Amino acid sequence: MTQPPKGSRPEQESSLLGPDGGFEQAFHLAPWLHVVATGGSAPLDEILPASGNVYVARLNGADMSDEMSTFRQFGELLKFPDYFGWNWNAFYDCLRDLQWLSSDHHVLIIESAESALPEDDDARDEFFRSLWRAGQRWSYVKRPEGVTFSRLSVVLSCDEGAVSGLASRLRGVQERLG
């Protein structure tokens, strides 16, 4: 059995009553990463701080057909600096910095997340690995006065039928990262 990441509670799956009366799945994989069905919800008390500036970027996985379109979408919405190198290492470096946004907290909402990089499994794994590592890097910090919430939260929204498959893929990423 794998241990949950430091500073996180164990993964939780929940079924929420949806607007149409059906149940929706949601997976809380880490304090910074949530997979929800389209129209579903994530625990706002863990995503949004009680106060401070929050930068929210809404991205669309259906528009991430390849690496370049993925980098372009993130670069435009997160205002990556001109020196962005258009590769996965540079992508991760930018996600773990984001200081140019002048925000206390950052929330990435990726709709149709199951559609991101559909033709390239290696790039897709690198994409999810970068999101996981960046979220972990920004995550909870213990201080004498208490615990600081994650400063980067990622919500992956996908079709209800893809929720558990995407959550499983992300668990695999987590296991490979150790």
Image: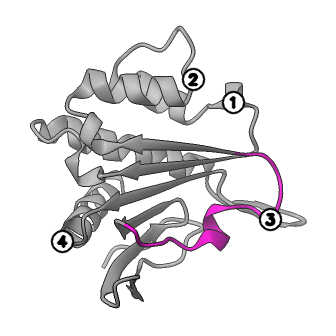
Residue kind at label 2, given as amino acid type: Lys
Q: Position of residue 87 (x, y in %)?
A: 34, 20
Q: Main secondary structure of the magenta part?
A: loop
Query: Residue 90 is drawn in which quadrant?
Result: top left
- The colour mode here is one colour
Query: Which circle's residue, 1 or 4, is located before the other in the chain?
Result: 1
- Reading the image, the residue beneath label 2 is 79
Identify residue for label 3.
Answer: 50
Report the side of 122 relative to 151 (left or right). left
Report the Cα–Cα distance between label 1 and label 3: 19 Å
Magenta segment boundaries in residue numbering: 39-54
**Vertical arrangement, residue 10 with respect to residue 149, above or below:** below
Label 3 amino acid?
Answer: Ala
Q: Which residue is mark 1?
A: 101
Query: As drawn, is 139 to the left or to the right of 146?
Result: left
Residue 50: x percent and y percent? 80, 65
Residues at discs 2 and 1 in contact (Cβ within 8 Å): yes
Mark 2–mark 1 Cα distance, whole angstroms, equals 8 Å
* Disc 3 from disc 2: Cα separation: 25 Å
Q: Is residue 73 above or below residue 178?
A: above
